[in-house]
Image: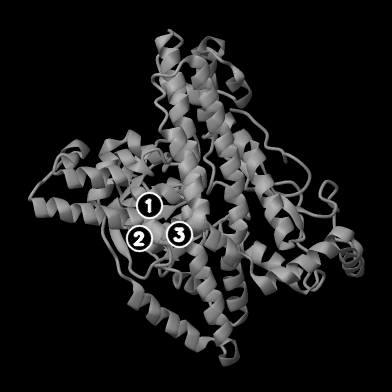
């Protein structure tokens, strides 16, 4: 496939493979390009950031991001203007002046505390109720116009909740960025700082805890189920517990952020394995010891402040990890569910033999009221083939000329601090376009593990072949991967940074990991014995 990668707009664009998969479906591309900038624009305005938004564009199926400045975004200068002119512009531009005042108020009042409170006291419940309302519709009995209306409702649910998802990131990633930004000034290492957040996300470990409880019930009954159906048949109590487990997880997309991914409810074998592999971990004493050691190295005048920013960061962690499955992966899984029913109707009407081809539909085509008005299977197969070819491309890590950040001291006090926080988050999420070397990356954990590598170019492939204790090697993971990651003995990703979802999941589940090892998918043979050394941040092939 002979293609040229060109910048999708003015400025500097960085490849982001840690979130959206290569060869992303057009439908999800359109949702992402609309919802993400809207959510980030709102939160940057509310927090007083000197930025317009973070733009997302797709080039040949690959997602590129750009931090869009507030001034001169569409005509970026070839080189930064003189420092005194930049300082003058920041202080005279009306919107910059307003945001400088907002930033100062934000750092004083810390509005994320209220947002985190609201999330746990009604916001999350309302989103779940909306998702369940769509999930509880029996799509097999509705007529075609009602089905297509339901698909459009699922798209609207995605747009609404994805925008909320990115808005919330200002209030969950904000405290995390502030914690690392401030503590870094006191000489603490970022990787060590992030390790102190372990155990702060009960939502991440929730599936493992619930699975462990179900396992205890099974053991008490003296049963040895081998399938999900056999598990449910152990007792009415176990049946109810499994139903509760799946009620808010069955239609969560856990393999990737796209409607061609799979949900847990579609894979009874994985649902069973994830439940039966659940284990409870208590890391409170270990984290307390690490925290005390770091705190002792913080200069005495700053220790009280260290305690506070760490406390706020830990409070933000659970929102960050609940945010994705609730506002992004579940709504997207419900859209997949609706599209699969459309695909089933197309198959029944003789318009193809594969219901999953409906995931190739474009957003503008969903206005149809009948499946006969949708593109035929031949056209949808061509689209799928194009996306498959895109996955074999080697996209540049960056596109467009560099846009250097403002020099230190140009942005006034609070605004400069907020900018530093944003830059840390972008870098630590693995969204800045930087590349690790070979099999080196960011290590998560303190204990090395040696095991067989299960290398896969798709999550579905990995999960089909992953055996308990294997080292899972993938491009990246989503937050919902916690539903099945407990099967792995170690994790290696080609993309991502120390704040990425893979890093958070490994930290919370106690799985040794190396994230951002760029050559993982090419230099690690499938089935090879590998050593994952999180302390060195390296993966080694074992002869």
Depth check: give the residue in front, 429 or 96.
96
Look at 44% across and 19% down and name the residue there.
142
The chosen color scheme is one colour
Kindly identify which numbered label has been placed on residue 509. 2
Depth check: give the residue in front, 242 or 299.
242
The answer to whether residue 445 of the structure is visible from this angle is: yes
Q: Nearer the viewer, mark 1 or mark 3?
A: 1
Look at 64% across and 70% down and name the residue there.
110
Element type at marker 1? Answer: helix
For marks 1 and 2, the one nearer the N-term is 1
Look at 43% across and 22% down and name the residue there.
341
Left or right relative to 12: residue 223: left
* Residue that numbered label 1 is attached to: 482
User: Against 254, is 341 above or below?
Assistant: above
Badge 1 vs badge 3, beta-carbon distance below 8 Å: no
- Position of the N terminus, as image quadrant, is top right
């Amino acid at each position: 496939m002979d293609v040229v990668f060109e910048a999708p707009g003015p400025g500097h664009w960085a490849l982001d493979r840690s979130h959206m998969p290569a060869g992303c479906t057009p439908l999800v591309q359109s949702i992402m390009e609309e919802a993400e900038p809207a959510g980030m624009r709102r939160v940057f305005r509310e927090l007083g950031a000197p930025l317009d938004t973070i733009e997302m564009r797709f080039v040949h199926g690959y997602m590129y991001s750009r931090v869009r400045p507030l001034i001169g975004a569409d005509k970026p200068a070839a080189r930064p203007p003189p420092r005194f002119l930049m300082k003058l512009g920041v202080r005279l531009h009306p919107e910059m002046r307003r945001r400088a005042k907002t930033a100062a108020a934000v750092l004083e009042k810390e509005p994320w505390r209220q947002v985190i409170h609201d999330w746990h006291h009604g916001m999350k419940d309302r989103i779940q109720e909306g998702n369940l309302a769509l999930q509880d519709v029996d799509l097999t009995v509705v007529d075609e116009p009602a089905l297509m209306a339901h698909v459009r409702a699922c798209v609207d649910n995605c747009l609404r909740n994805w925008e909320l998802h990115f808005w919330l990131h200002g209030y969950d990633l904000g405290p995390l960025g502030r914690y690392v930004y401030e503590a870094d000034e006191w000489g603490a290492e970022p990787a060590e700082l992030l390790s102190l957040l372990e155990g702060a996300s009960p939502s991440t470990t929730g599936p493992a805890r619930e699975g462990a409880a179900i396992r205890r019930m099974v053991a008490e009954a003296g049963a040895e189920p081998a399938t999900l159906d056999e598990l449910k048949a152990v007792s009415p109590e176990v049946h109810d517990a499994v139903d509760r487990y799946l009620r808010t997880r069955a239609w969560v997309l856990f393999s990737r952020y796209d409607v061609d991914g799979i949900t847990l409810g579609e894979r009874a074998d994985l649902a069973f394995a994830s439940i039966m592999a659940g284990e409870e971990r208590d890391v409170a004493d270990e984290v307390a010891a690490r925290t005390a050691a770091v705190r002792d190295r913080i200069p005495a005048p700053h220790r009280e402040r260290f305690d506070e920013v760490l406390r706020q960061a830990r409070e933000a962690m659970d929102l960050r990890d609940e945010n994705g499955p609730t506002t992004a992966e579940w709504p997207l899984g419900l859209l997949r569910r609706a599209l699969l029913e459309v695909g089933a109707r197309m198959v029944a009407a003789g318009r193809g033999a594969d219901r999953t081809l409906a995931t190739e539909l474009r957003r503008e085509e969903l206005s149809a009221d009948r499946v006969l008005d949708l593109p035929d299977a031949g056209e949808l197969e061509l689209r799928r083939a194009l996306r498959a070819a895109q996955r074999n491309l080697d996209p540049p890590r960056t596109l467009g000329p560099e846009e250097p950040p403002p020099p230190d001291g140009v942005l006034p006090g609070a605004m400069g601090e907020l900018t530093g926080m944003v830059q840390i988050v972008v870098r630590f999420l693995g969204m800045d376009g930087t590349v690790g070397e070979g099999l080196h990356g960011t290590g998560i954990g303190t204990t090395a593990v040696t095991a067989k590598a299960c290398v896969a170019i798709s999550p579905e492939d990995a999960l089909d072949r992953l055996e308990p204790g294997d080292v899972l090697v993938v491009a990246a993971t989503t937050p919902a991967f916690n539903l099945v990651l407990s099967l792995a003995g170690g994790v290696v990703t080609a993309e991502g940074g120390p704040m990425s979802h893979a890093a958070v999941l490994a930290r919370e589940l106690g799985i040794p990991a190396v994230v951002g090892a760029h050559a993982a998918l090419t230099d690690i043979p499938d089935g090879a014995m590998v050593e994952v050394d999180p302390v060195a941040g390296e993966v080694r092939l074992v002869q």
